[in-house]
Amino acid sequence: MTRRITDAELEDKPVTEQELAEWERLAEVATPGPWVANELRERLAGRIVIASVSGGKDSAAMSLHLTELGVEHRRVFCDTGWEHPKTYEYLRGELTAKLGPIDEIRGDLLLPDLVRKKGMFPSRTRRFCTQELKVFPLQRYVRAVQDETGDVVNAVGIRAGESLSRSKMPEWEWSDGFDCDVWRPLIRWTLEDVIAIHHRHGLRPNPLYLMGASRVGCWPCIHARKSEVRLVADVDPARIDAIRELEREVTAKAEARHAAKGETFESLGFNRPTFFQAPGALRSEGKDGRCVPIDEVVTWSRTGSGGRQFELFAPETEPGCMRWGLCETDEADDFIEETLAHPDEELTP
């Protein structure tokens, strides 16, 4: 957190280059200079800005920031059918009331039915969930807007501080897959900047953050962290039940496919399909490292470091309400955002 330095302190203390650079960054984030505003106006002249909104903090901050800049934009939400109910309530209620109308788009099938149709779960090497549920619907939406109005800019709420891969992303980039510019208005923002703009506009965050979630989206994502699996199991056991049932259905279909050829999982050396695959901690403990049933993953999520010892209490992390300054106490897979920016890149077969 950047500490504010008083004028009196400045009189007795020389300004370092690091402090000067940080002040300039904060000044540009909060109130971009006229040259920035003019450059933006020129770059966006005659173009429609489409802002992808997920129900999470960064995309909400991006839309608020665009409003502060005077940039008119259309907001769009890609519905996977796998978000937490509170995300839908927040998106259609408080977020719409604060940001304005949000178009909802979806693929031909939502995640559970897509998994059933394919007879498999998405994985790190077959990320069909991202392509089918986010990229393809958004491409269709962008093209429809292009046909209607002409040139389009696709704005996404990515911050460099979120990961190493995102830190290498430019603010502006051309996407062949969307046939338009991709703009990352928050690329130099910090988490503090994101929280500040929520406070400035009186917008409460998605309730999932206040429950302890570190990111918002698929509930859960196939790339969920250990703590995220634990959170889902603790607050939404019905979702764990749904995953267990999906695993049963997909396994039954796979068994039928193999049986039709006179084969079995064992004869083929295959694992039975599961929602979570190759979690690193389980692999390090001598598991097969590919497919682990949901009940085993939940059990693992309740253990301490190393996966062998159960914790009496959950790890002490800063509560969501504290991170957002909503109480008086003393506190998302790169792949999805990267694929949205580069949908033309081939998936690993």
Image (cartoon, rainbow, N blue to C red):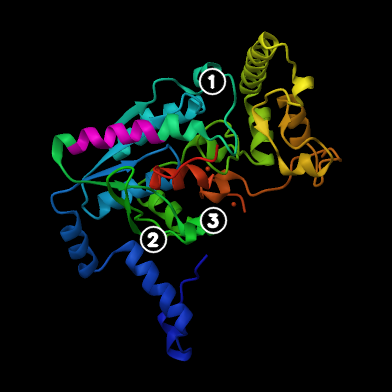
- Choose between 143 and 239: the one closer to the eye: 143
Element at label 1: helix
Mark 2 Cα within 10 Å, few/some/many (few <14, many 20+)?
few
Magenta region:
135-146
* CA neighbours of label 1 inside 10 A, class few (<14), some (14 to 19), many (20+): few
User: At numbered mark 3, what does the secondary structure look like: helix, strand or loop?
Assistant: loop
Q: Which residue is mark 3?
A: 163
Between the C-alphas of marks 3 and 1, the distance is 31 Å
Tell which tag, 1 or 2, sits nearer the viewer.
1
Q: Disc 3 vs disc 1: which is toward the camera? A: 1
Number of other residues with Cα within 10 Å of mark 3, as a class: few under 14, some 14 to 19, many 20 or more: few
Q: Which mark's residue is nearer the viewer, 2 or 3?
A: 2
Q: Which mark is residue 170?
A: 2
Q: Which residue is mark 1?
A: 118
| Amino acid type for the residue under numbered disc 1 | Lys
Mark sitting earlier along the chain (1/2): 1
**Does residue 134 appear left or right of residue 330 in this picture?**
left
Which disc number belongs to residue 237? none
